[in-house]
Amino acid sequence: MPTLLTTPVSEAQIRALKVGEAVEITGTLFTGRDAVHKYLAKGGALPPAVNLRDGIIYHCGPVVIKDDAGRWKVVAAGPTTSAREEPYQGDILRRFGVRGVIGKGGMGARTLAACQEVGAVYLHAIGGAAQVLAEHIKSVRGVYFFEEFGSPEAIWEFEVERFPAVVTMDAHGGSLHREVFEASQAELLKRL
Amino acid sequence: MNGLPASLLELIRRTSAEIPDDVQRAILAALEKEKKNTIAEDAFKIIQKNIELAKQKSQPICQDTGSVLFYVDCPPGFDQIGFAETAREAVTLATRKGYLRQNSVDSITGKNDGTNVGPGAPTFHFHQHRAPAVQVRLILKGGGCENVGAQYSLPSEKLHAERDLDGCRKVILDAVLQAQGKGCGPGVLGVCIGGDRATGYELSKTQFLRRLDDRNPIPELDQLEQDILNTANELGIGPMGFGGRTTLLGVKICAANRVPASYFVSISYMCWAYRRMGVTLDAEGRIANWLG
């Protein structure tokens, strides 16, 4: 059974998570990807309504349209490749007190070290599964930097219910990505 | 060609929301084969559910609706300019309807005007043929898988890859290793051996127009395709790089002549959310039939 996480998430709950564990998240997710990470890393400020403390960032550029009543409707919302945020992620975890990052493909040594230091985890959602994941997004509570960065790069505030992911980097230095890379590299060497 | 705008809009909608049947079969086979009660099996289950949901809701399989690549086979005298104008309008309308994400960014200013139309977007590849039919194929290629494409210049000392098919094998398998996790696996490789830096990549992408269940008519390339597919699937990378039995769903390789000084191997990666559809148009631009 997946472990249920509700935002804001406590440090103790995050530190109890281990690589390979399935989780389901209920509460608030803030999307943030390339433009947001670069902006924040250069010292940019978050809008007052965006509070990342004990929260979770989702590396995602969703498809969102306005319905006939003028309300935002999330049409598709899977994760984007997280590796591009590696230069920034560790600092952002520290500065804003973030407890989790959802994305795909995993991240590198600097992010892993920051996860250990501050008590955070990397949560892997299934890449490309934009419909399954959008079903878990119950509403759009707000959008920030829409004009500046464009729709995919904006910060979207989503209300989510039982959003599924897997812990692939934990707060104890464990990384499934490092394990699988090393094992597959060894297998490949045998076959060259 | 009064029917063309509606036909292109429908082509975009279906390409974004529906997986080709050959890819669907390959994903189901991979799900069957995966070790039970693992996160890899769970990943396949979510992938399969996503495919069903996207089709049922007529919404994008993946939120990254990618680069919009049109491949048009047409007879001499076909109005390519008119086609491209209509296609650009169809792309903008499809974006408004949410079949495509607002996915085209001005590389100088960083602005995204939300139309998906601009320099180089969408992309058209016109090919004349001596037949009356107009065939339009569309590929939507997401950025995650595009980013893990790689071009190797042989020889590669680092990879001990010389200028022969074994050298090609080594660099292609290196690309599989490096792509893990980042391009949404299990994926499909399109490869071109030879050509120049531009044509190599371009031809590697045309391999995605092939069906997964076809076989390469050139024996050496057929053997290389099968070898890389089998070897990659022994590496244990698995879906999304979670570890597992299926790392690739297919490998498609072509060759182009090269100049003596160059030996490029260009590799494009297509994610499991493989978006490829095609239509034959009638004289009015209406859809006469869907291509497999």
Image: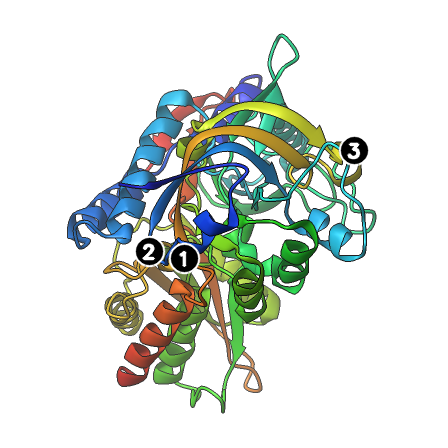
What amino acid is at disc 2?
Gly
Q: Quickly name the residue at label 3.
A: A147
Mark closer to the chain start, 3 or 1? 3
Could you tell whether B263 is left or right of B210 in the image?
right
Residue B46 image position (x, y, % from top left): 32, 39
* Circle 3 or circle 2, nearest the eye: 2
Q: Is residue A91 above or below residue B170?
A: above
Element at badge 1? strand
Q: Are marks 1 and 2 in contact (CB under 8 Å)?
A: yes
Q: Is residue B82 above or below residue B41?
A: above
Q: Are marks 3 and 2 in contact (CB under 8 Å)?
A: no
Q: Quickly name the residue at label 2.
A: A20
Residue A80 image position (x, y, % from top left): 53, 48
Could you tell whether A52 is left or right of A11 in the image?
right
Element at badge 3? helix
Q: Is any part of residue A174 visible from this angle?
A: yes
Looking at the rendering, in which quadrant would you find the N terminus of chain B? top right
Q: Which of the labelled discs sits on residue B35, or is there none?
A: none
Q: Mark 3 and mark 2: span between their CA atoms?
A: 38 Å
* Circle 3 or circle 1, nearest the eye: 1
Residue B116 image position (x, y, % from top left): 67, 36
- Establish whether labels 3 and 1 are both on one chain: yes
> To which chain does the residue with label 1 belong?
A
Q: Which of the labelled discs sits on residue A168, or is there none?
A: 1
